Image (cartoon, rainbow, N blue to C red):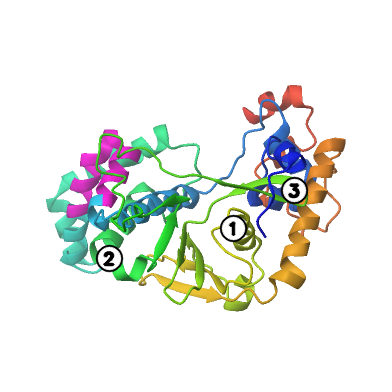
Amino acid sequence: MPFVLDEVTSTILKERPLSVSQLRTFDRCPKSYELQYLTNPRTPVLDMGAAVWFGKVIQQIIQRAYHEVPLLEGHLQVWQQECGPIFEDLQDWFHLDVASRKSGAANSHARKDWNQAHPEYKTLTARIDAHQQEYLSNWNWSEKYPLTAYYRWSATFARTTPMSQIVLPYAALVEGLPVRWPDGEVIRRFDGEDGGREHYKLLHGVIGGAHVVGVPDQFGVDPDGTAWISDNKVTASQLSSEELGYDSQLAVYYILLRQNTWITDGQPTRVGHCYIKEKEPPRYEWSDISHYDDLVLPQLHDHFAQLKAAIVKGQFLRVRGIQPAAFSPCKFCGVRYACLTPQDHIEREVTK
């Protein structure tokens, strides 16, 4: 429900904001949360997969589509912004890569003959790999998906995806910003000199007595009055309709949209993900919010209240060694190397 901006709420909104990402980190391991978000300077997070970076690239392309930028043009804008020094190399490499793949099956004599006749393909690949290693080394790149593979994915997505498959009808907000002017005309956010900048606006609210921020990728209301809240996901896995109905991130968006009066009490609402995979058309999966009022929202209030209490008390227990190795979150934790290390020795440990 909309919150009243009274003295208590105003005070809470001046506090350091929390997010679903922070909450999930805290619930996995309070010590990991302290190291990542409260230590000054923050402990560097290792093992952040490059898929996270690529997901942001795809989201920036899709965001432009809502402001009447064709997908291919948006793809070129974003990649020039993200990889300017090798942008032309990436384009040249992609055209050669298409020709190489058309020449024959992988490891066939025809493919090998084509590659041998076009040494510039290998030269460009090496140049792009060098850029990845030097300028994007803070991301963990898999062997299957180096920078060239992600560029191929993005370029193919932009060239083959119809706008109708990716754009949510009747979108009102994208990244927290209005899509249209009051007269209904689309706001062209990426036409001017500032077209390379990131555009988003966080929604602010209060959950469990804590200041919480977040923003869905897309939000809209159809002519029947049903609200639609969605996020784009570049991932091999996906949630079922039932699982989406319990997803904390989507539930936070729902609360924030209600508190900011974009959704009214009792308004029919659907929440979901748009899954973007390399060799499949984009696909939306939706769920209702039938469990929100009795299960999901009370749980969120309790968990954010618990996180805020831990911050106030300064108590962050580690979970290392509590769970058997097969169930421990430590092997997936990006600050595990610092968990048992005094803060003044962390930098030395990182460089070993």
Residue type at the position of mark 1:
Tyr
Front position in the image: 148 or 36: 36
Q: How many marks?
A: 3
Helix, strand or loop under label 3: helix
Q: Is residue 86 magenta?
A: yes
Q: Which residue is mark 1?
A: 253
- Of the two numbered discs 3 and 2 in the rendering, the one whose residue sits closer to the viewer: 3
* Of callouts 1 and 2, the N-terminal one: 2
The magenta stretch is: 74-95
- Circle 2 crowding by C-alpha within 10 Å: few under 14, some 14–19, many from 20: few
Tell me the residue at 45%/64% (across/down): 220
Q: Which mark's residue is nearer the viewer, 1 or 3? A: 1
Quadrant into which the N terminus falls = bottom right
Measured Cα–Cα span from mark 1 to mark 2: 45 Å
Horizontal side of 19 relative to 306 (left or right) equals left
Element at badge 1? helix
Can residue 7 be seen by looking at this rendering? yes
Mark 3, Cα crowd under 10 Å, few <14 / some 14-19 / many 20+, is many
Disc 3 designates what residue?
26
Q: Nearer the viewer, mark 1 or mark 2?
A: 1
Where residue 101 sits: x, y (%)?
22, 63
Q: Which residue is mark 2?
A: 106
* Amino acid type, residue under disc 2 in the picture: Ala
Q: CA distance from mark 1 to mark 3?
A: 19 Å
In the image, what residue type sits under mark 3?
Phe
Vertical side of 3 occupied by 126: above or below: above
Taking the image as shown, residue 280 lies to the left or right of residue 121, namely: right
